[in-house]
Image (cartoon, rainbow, N blue to C red):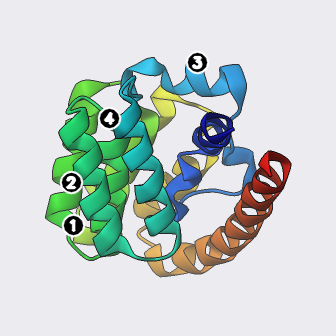
Amino acid sequence: MAVTILSFKLKLLFISVSFKGFGSREQFLTGSDFKTSYGVRHMSDNYMAIKMFDEGIAAYLRGDFKASIKIFTQALNHDSKFALAYSSRGAAHLKSGHTRKAISDFNRAIRLNPNYARAHHLRGLAYERMGNFAGAYLNFDRALEIDPDLTVAYRKRDCVLDKSVDDCIEIEDLEMADHLAAMRIALFSADKKAA
């Protein structure tokens, strides 16, 4: 049952790592969509790496970014080629205000899987935070080349192009609240079914 719950959580994932800029419910992936959109290359076959990753996601969702960074690091100690763990740790670094560390992790995830659209999107968010709108635009654009269905990247690309970042943040806050509510319902339903 634990593997089923983990699998369900990974399918819903990137758990859109509940990051500002991650889209609404249409961002959820399931089954073959998950494998074709993100490929197996950013996943791990190492049980301990996946177990630690799952714990890191739980800490992230609780808002304990310091703990999630530590746990994602432990997952990477078990599998140094776990691109999803790098991008998730990068998202936690970004939420903690460590933008350069976040970019370093996104770079590693992209080196491991150059076609990892979410990692490009996240790196774009980091560049945007640094005020590097050209770098942000290029990353959002690359994410869309890889995954044209990544709707949030269209909005972010438009925001940095217009440099109307403040207006975009307000809209994304509302979208994120909707997204997190749907995520909690989905995770609660999965836990209930497993019990």
Marks 1 and 4 sit apart, C-alpha to C-alpha, by: 18 Å
| Relative to 101, 85 lies left or right | right
Q: Is residue 20 visible?
A: no
Mark 2 or mark 4: name the one nearer the start of the chain. Answer: 4
Which amino acid is tagged 2?
Answer: Ile
Marks 3 and 1 sit apart, C-alpha to C-alpha, by: 29 Å
* Quarter occupied by residue 44: top left
Marks 2 and 3 sit apart, C-alpha to C-alpha, by: 25 Å
Mark 1 or mark 4: name the one nearer the start of the chain. Answer: 4
| Relative to 101, 30 lies left or right | right
Q: Going 60% across and 71% down the picture, which residue do you hit?
A: 172
Residue that mark 3 sits on: 36
Q: Position of residue 52 (x, y in %)?
A: 37, 48
Q: Position of residue 83 (x, y in %)?
A: 32, 35
Quarter of the image with the N terminus in it: top right
Residue 99 badge: 1
Of the pair 190 and 153, the residue shown nearer to us: 190
Mark 1 touches mark 2? (CB < 8 Å):
yes
Residue that mark 2 sits on: 103
Residue that mark 4 sits on: 83
Could you classify mark 1 by the number of other residues whose Cα lies within 10 Å: few (under 14), some (14-19), or many (20 or more)?
many
Badge 4 element: helix
166 shown above or below 9: below
| Relative to 174, 37 lies left or right | left
Marks 2 and 4 sit apart, C-alpha to C-alpha, by: 13 Å
